[in-house]
Every structure is written in structure tokens, then in C-alpha cells.
Amino acid sequence: MALITFASNNGDIGGGEEMLLALALAARELGHDVTVVAPATPDGVVRRARSSGFRTIAIKGQGRRAYLANLRAWEAAERQGLLWRNGLVPGVATAGRRNRVLHLHQPPQSRAQWAASFAARAGCLAVLCPSHDMATRLKNSWAFSQMEPTVLWNRVHDFPLPVIDPAPGLPHRIGFLGRTTEAKGIVVLAEALEMLNSRDLGGVRLVIGGDTRFADSDEQIRVDRALAKVEPLDGMCDPDRGCRPGPP
């Protein structure tokens, strides 16, 4: 049995935080002793981790700078075993420390983030990412030239879904799962569907399971403008209960 501490990138629940909780659950199922560390404010990750029965450490402080400083102080004083840093923020906060893994869910988005990732990966046991495409992008960058990233697929629970054949004459449906932001490609997808529908190929409807959390107001406007042209269906649901998107 190993001692593993999973350190969250954010206090709110996003895709990366969902993966953190899934990985923590998998580690516990394998018999490891798991701790989850996350910001006290906002407390979405803390509440979910506690409700799942994990030993949970809430790092106090307002804002990202406070989380960086207080996480580093806590890690130096109390952390035992392996530190699984789920994102660039805990990666930077604990740069230079021993027995660490860096798990990135998206490539750095700016020069400052590339520099931060270089500091975060120095001396760590492994760098993990969710796809071969991202692994190649990291490997070909100066920040990761000395370390081969390892692909770790995103883990989700298996749950049965009925196979529903499309009714004759109804539009085809394309699903989008995740954060509806420009970085995730939702605007490009909406523009592509608008082009398809303008060519009278039988019609395509977009079904969305996600929202624009973490996007600023200007980006929100651009996303809303693009989606308004294709009138997407709401595909959000509880996977434990099952669901179907709204009518075409």
C-alpha cells in the first residue's frame, strides 16, 4: 500500500477535477491510502472528496496566490508519500520537491505557463497527459525536452446506455461533452455544423453536455453567439439515472 496525495488545480469542479476524483477513487480501490488536497474556497472539490469518504485537506486562503503559498507550506510540513499534482497550479506550488508526479490535462497556453511547466516538471518522477497528441506537443517543446510524457487516458465509470436508432427523417445528432469554451473547440464545431446545415444534407443537431465555467465574459459572449446559430439541445444528465436529449 502506498500513501498518495492528490493535489487539485482548482476549488471548483471542472473536467480536471473530475479526473482527480476518479483517479483518487481508482487508487483507493487498488488498496492505497489516499488524501485529497484542494482550496477551501471555493469548496466544490473539498465537498465532493469528503462526501466520497476521502481524507481531505482544505487549504485556506483567498485567491490563487494564497493557494500556491499555503499549499507549498502544507506540503513541506505534512505531506507523506507520493504527491500527484493534478494541474499546473499544484505543480508550480511544489516545484523542486521530491516524490512528485505532474499530471497536465491541457498544454500550457502562454509563455508564462510554459515557463511554469518547466519549473513544475523539473525533478518529478513522471509527467502524465491524456492523449498522444498532447504528449507529442509537450515532447517537442523546450520545457519538456528532457522528459518523455506518459499518456494516461481519462478514467470514467462504466455505465450502460441504450442504443437508440435514429428515426427516419429526423436530424442526426452530434454530441459535445465538456467545457463549452473556445479552447475546447466549441465555436469551431458550431461553425462547422452551421455550414453543414446550410447545405441541406438532412440536418444535424448539436447536443451539449457542459457549460462555460472558467470563461471570461467576452469569451462567453462569443460562445453564446456561435451556439445561438445552431440552437443546441441540452444533454446534461445524471449518468446513474440515464437520460435522453430533448426533442429534435
Image (spheres, helix red, strand yellow):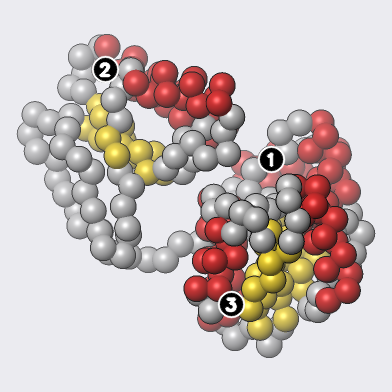
- Above or below residue 140? Residue 43 is below
In the image shown, does 62 or 206 lie closer to the viewer? 62
Q: Quadrant of the N terminus?
A: bottom right
- Above or below residue 241? Residue 147 is above
Q: Dot 1: within a 10 Å radius of its alpha carbon, few (fewer than 14), some, or many (20 or more) residues?
A: some
Mark 1 residue element: loop
In the image shown, does 58 or 140 lie closer to the viewer? 58
Q: Is residue 178 left or right of residue 46?
A: left
- Seen as rendered, the residue at the extreme top is 198
Separation of disc 3 and disc 2 at Cα? Answer: 48 Å
- The mark that comes first in sequence, 3 or 1, is 3
| Residue 54: assigned label | 3
Residue found 55% across the figure and 73% down from its top = 50
| Residue 107: assigned label | 1
Instruction: Report x, y in % for residue 184.
Output: 53, 35
| Residue placed under numbered mark 2 in the picture | 197
Residue found 59% across the figure and 29% down from its top = 216
Separation of disc 1 and disc 2 at Cα? Answer: 32 Å
Residue found 25% across the figure and 27% down from its top = 204
Q: Are marks 3 and 2 in contact (CB under 8 Å)?
A: no
Residue type at tag 1: Pro
Choose mark 3 or mark 2, whichever is in front. Answer: 3
Residue type at tag 3: Phe
Q: Is residue 208 left or right of residue 21?
A: left
Quadrant of the image occupied by residue 134 = top right
